[in-house]
Image (spheres, rainbow, N blue to C red):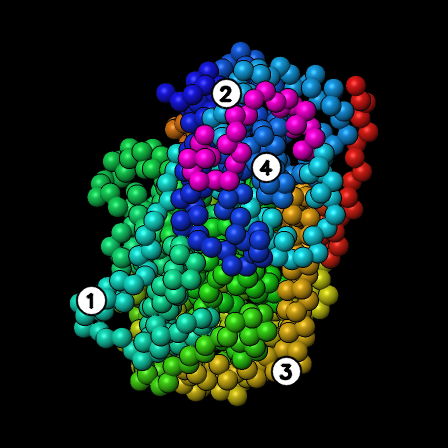
């Protein structure tokens, strides 16, 4: 039993207030042990950073002693209507004698749930900025002076036992509400001006992040892993793993293991660049541990969800521990659910019976990763980039990212917008003590130069010599479009010859058209289910089933079987598959090289044909210029096509491809591309990463970020009953996870086609759906310039609503990156 048992911090589950504060202090201590010293911070704040975190988390919820809050958590009243963190400020003057230390503690306490200032109506400035003391006292009262004195005594005793610099004198009676009101007014004055010192702004958001991190961890009764498997013992483990396969480490892998600092590794597919990156990471973990005395986290990032899932399985197999790996992407719970069900050796009926339990476990595991439990995380770089949003919701990502190791696998260059934002974030990771490696089979010199410009530390470049790997591909060009009858005839011939054929179209419309024409031929020749269509507009459960079918029939290491897979860009780095031949639409060279990599993947065949078809260009709504198949800008596609024309019929390898990329990025388009990357990088730094107003509201930026990277999802109207039944089958988040099988990915610009069902918390779209094709017949009239067909990407033969693609970044969204919204004046209030 803790002191003051009649004071609760929460009701579900019930927890005493002092127990919660003590658990928060323990969580903050665990966080300090894992993160270590943050060298980016300036003295004297660097020396007192963790002290401020400990004292802030120890006092952050003291304001919950108010009778109004206690009535709410004990069920005596439905709502209190005030902010407990503001009242918590009243305990600081008696506890912390140092005014500068108290200033940082106070702002961390005040902002662990709400912004301090800004345009939002929930900011503390808006709620309490001009309220007089007497009005504040009347609205918050009553506060028991006996409880306040007892809690103050407990705080002083607990802090003193933890070795924190507090006033150990008996606190005596203090007017907590008067103190709280005075401290809040000081905060609103002190933090009103911008912080032009970038290190001070970073230190402020890291402080907020550490306090919110500890609060969330203690509230969830979570724990942090304290060991890094990719550390001193990892090279020995990898040697043993290779020995069981009759393999030895290659020269470039040993070179990577010797690097101390950032790494740029160019190594062809199949050369073991993943293992090289992991050996580099193990070395950085040891170096950082000696410098900061923490346990560095290792973040392995990939651009696509399926490749992330595959890497998580691969690492778990290598380390012999599935619990050591966290999967960090928007569908992490779905990944854990699929893994739990797939691991069950059961009949379909047993699997269905097992799903509710598996869903509960999957939700629990995903929640643990969201609490940053694991020291190894596999995910997209965009999940980490959310830390730039800062604030109570995202600053925890930043503190977890400090003193960490980042492996960026297959960093794509041709999208200047996202590349610029990622480079800006990489610079922030470095400022926070991070080490960064970029791994690629084909990485242009222009991108290497941008990395060198972005990062302050030295970058060690390793390029593999001739490893004696077999040449896997022979380039063939065709003068007609991929959907031309001549292309269909040639693909048909390959199928009838018994080959496994991959067809990659640039848009869903072309993919559906080709599948309609080719699937009957493939299935007549090679049996039922020998043809599949894969693109991004399937329901989640249908896409998972399709990916499993492709892996079973065409996965690396499987016996070679004839068949057909028609896909869009989702195949580029999403599945570990191996085909006999490729027919593809034109694209930027990096994208084409990724498509080539799905053919003759391990070099078991003579050079296999990769056949690229001539581009066709057209404008797209909302954009100037022309686009290949309405998707890729003309300049990089045209540049790639001109290079390929000079090598038609040649055997090609990835070292040649790097030279081709260098030629493209040295062209006039390449100069324009570099300028765009610089602009996007600068815009992201200026808008997100300066932290001039670290405790301002950033909700408008969150929406803009989601539009850029996350998109949204919807269910079909015809699936509404099934969705509701899954929601009701299991309580809480587990039921929602099961229902997510019916979600269809869609970009933000298609949201106006949907209606939002508030009770179910889901968007609904109307259309006819085929589980094999995900095609649609129009049922909704075009609205706001967006037709139903623009979402489902129906075949081009449908003339009712021509397929259109929106501009990558609508002007209203871009405006958020180029100027700071004006600060909203304080709301006029009547004072007591």
Say above or below: 18 vs 37. above
* Alpha-carbon span between mark 3 and mark 4: 63 Å
Query: Hey, which quadrant is residue 626 in on the image?
Result: bottom right
- In the picture of the structure, the residue carrying the numbered disc 1 is 240
Q: x%, y% of residue 139?
A: 69, 18
Q: Name the element at disc 2.
A: helix
- In the picture of the structure, the residue carrying the numbered disc 2 is 150
Residue in the image at 44% along x and 53% along y: 36
Q: Residue furthest front?
A: 169
Task: Mark 2 vs mark 3: give the one in front.
Answer: 2
Say the numbered circle drawn on residue 783. none
* Alpha-carbon span between mark 2 and mark 1: 59 Å
Q: Nearer the viewer, residue 495 or 307?
A: 307
Magenta segment: 157-184
The question of residue 179 being in magenta is answered with: yes
Q: Name the element at disc 1.
A: helix
Q: x%, y% of residue 271?
A: 33, 75
Number of residues whose C-alpha sits closer than 10 Å to that of mark 1, classed few (under 14), some (14–19) or many (20 or more): some
- In the picture of the structure, the residue carrying the numbered disc 4 is 97
Number of residues whose C-alpha sits closer than 10 Å to that of mark 3, classed few (under 14), some (14–19) or many (20 or more): some
- In the picture of the structure, the residue carrying the numbered disc 3 is 667
Q: Name the element at disc 3.
A: loop
Q: x%, y% of residue 162?
A: 42, 38
Mark found first going from the N terminus, 4 or 2 = 4
């Amino acid at each position: 039993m803790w002191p003051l048992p009649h004071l609760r911090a929460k009701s579900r589950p019930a927890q005493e207030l002092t127990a919660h504060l003590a658990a928060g202090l323990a969580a903050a201590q665990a966080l300090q042990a894992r993160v270590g010293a943050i060298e980016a911070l300036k003295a004297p704040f660097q020396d007192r950073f963790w002290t401020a975190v400990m004292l802030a988390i120890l006092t952050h919820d003291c304001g919950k002693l108010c009778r109004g809050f206690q009535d709410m958590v004990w069920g005596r009243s439905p709502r209190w209507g005030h902010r407990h963190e503001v009242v918590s400020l009243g305990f600081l003057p008696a506890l912390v004698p140092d005014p500068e230390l108290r200033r940082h503690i106070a702002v961390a306490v005040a902002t662990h749930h709400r912004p301090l200032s800004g345009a939002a109506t929930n900011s503390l400035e808006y709620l309490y900025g001009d309220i007089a003391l007497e009005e504040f006292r009347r609205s918050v009262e009553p506060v028991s002076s006996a409880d306040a004195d007892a809690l103050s005594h407990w705080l002083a005793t607990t802090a003193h036992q933890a070795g924190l610099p507090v006033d150990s004198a008996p606190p005596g009676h203090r007017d907590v509400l008067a103190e709280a009101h005075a401290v809040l007014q000081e905060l609103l004055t002190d933090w009103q001006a911008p912080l032009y010192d970038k290190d001070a702004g970073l230190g402020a958001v890291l402080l907020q992040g550490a306090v919110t991190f500890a609060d969330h961890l203690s509230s969830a009764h979570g724990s942090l892993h304290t060991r890094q498997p990719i550390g001193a013992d990892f090279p020995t483990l990898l040697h043993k793993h290779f020995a069981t396969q009759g393999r030895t480490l290659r020269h470039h892998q040993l070179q990577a293991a010797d690097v101390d600092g950032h790494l740029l590794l160019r190594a062809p597919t199949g050369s073991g660049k993943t293992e090289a990156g992991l050996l580099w990471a193990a070395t950085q973990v040891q170096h950082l541990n000696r410098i900061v005395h923490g346990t560095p986290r290792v973040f392995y990032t990939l651009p696509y969800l399926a490749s992330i899932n595959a890497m998580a399985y691969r690492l778990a197999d290598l380390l012999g521990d599935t619990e050591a790996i966290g999967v960090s992407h928007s569908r992490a719970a779905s990944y854990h659910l699929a893994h739990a069900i797939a691991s069950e050796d059961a009949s379909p009926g047993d699997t269905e019976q097992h799903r509710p339990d598996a869903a509960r476990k999957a939700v629990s595991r995903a929640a643990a990763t969201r609490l940053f439990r694991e020291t190894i995380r596999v995910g997209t770089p965009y999940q980490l980039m959310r830390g730039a949003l800062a604030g109570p919701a995202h600053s925890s990502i930043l503190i977890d990212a400090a003193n960490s190791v980042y492996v960026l696998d297959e960093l794509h260059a041709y999208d200047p917008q996202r590349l610029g934002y990622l480079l800006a974030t990489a610079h922030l990771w470095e400022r926070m003590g991070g080490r960064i490696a970029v791994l690629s089979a084909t990485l242009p010199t222009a991108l290497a130069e941008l990395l060198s410009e972005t990062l302050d530390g030295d970058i060690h470049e390793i390029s593999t010599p001739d490893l004696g790997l077999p040449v896997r591909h022979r380039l063939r060009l065709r003068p007609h479009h991929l959907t031309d009858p001549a292309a269909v005839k040639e693909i048909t011939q390959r199928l009838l010859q018994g080959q496994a054929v991959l067809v990659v179209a640039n848009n869903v419309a072309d993919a559906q058209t080709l599948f309609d024409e080719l699937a009957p031929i493939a299935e007549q020749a090679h049996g039922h289910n020998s043809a599949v269509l894969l693109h991004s507009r399937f329901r989640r459960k249908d896409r998972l089933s399709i990916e499993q079918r492709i892996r079973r029939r065409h996965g690396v290491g499987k016996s070679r079987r004839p068949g057909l897979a028609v896909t869009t860009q989702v195949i580029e780095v999403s599945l570990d598959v191996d085909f006999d031949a490729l027919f593809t639409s034109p694209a930027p060279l990096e994208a084409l090289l990724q498509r080539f990599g799905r053919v003759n993947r391990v070099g078991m065949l003579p050079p296999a044909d990769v056949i690229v078809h001539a581009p066709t260009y057209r404008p797209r709504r909302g954009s100037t210029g022309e686009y290949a198949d309405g998707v890729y800008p003309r300049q990089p596609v045209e540049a790639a096509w001109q290079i390929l024309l000079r090598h038609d019929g040649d055997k090609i390898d990835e070292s040649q491809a790097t030279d081709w990329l260098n030629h493209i990025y040295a062209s006039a388009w390449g100069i324009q591309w570099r300028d765009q990357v610089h602009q996007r990088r600068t815009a992201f730094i200026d808008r997100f990463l300066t932290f001039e107003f670290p405790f301002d509201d950033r909700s408008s930026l969150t929406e803009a970020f989601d539009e850029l990277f996350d998109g949204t999802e919807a269910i079909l109207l015809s699936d509404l009953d099934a969705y509701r039944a899954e929601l009701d089958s299991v309580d809480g988040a587990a039921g929602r996870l099961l229902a997510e099988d019916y979600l269809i990915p869609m970009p933000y610009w298609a949201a106006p086609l949907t209606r939002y069902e508030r009770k179910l918390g889901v968007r609904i779209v109307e259309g006819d759906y085929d589980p094999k094709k995900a095609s649609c017949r129009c049922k909704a009239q075009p609205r706001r310039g967006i037709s139903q067909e623009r979402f489902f990407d129906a075949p081009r033969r449908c003339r009712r609503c021509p397929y259109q693609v929106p501009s990558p970044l609508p002007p209203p969204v871009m405006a958020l990156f180029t100027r700071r919204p004006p600060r909203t004046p304080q709301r006029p209030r009547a004072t007591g």
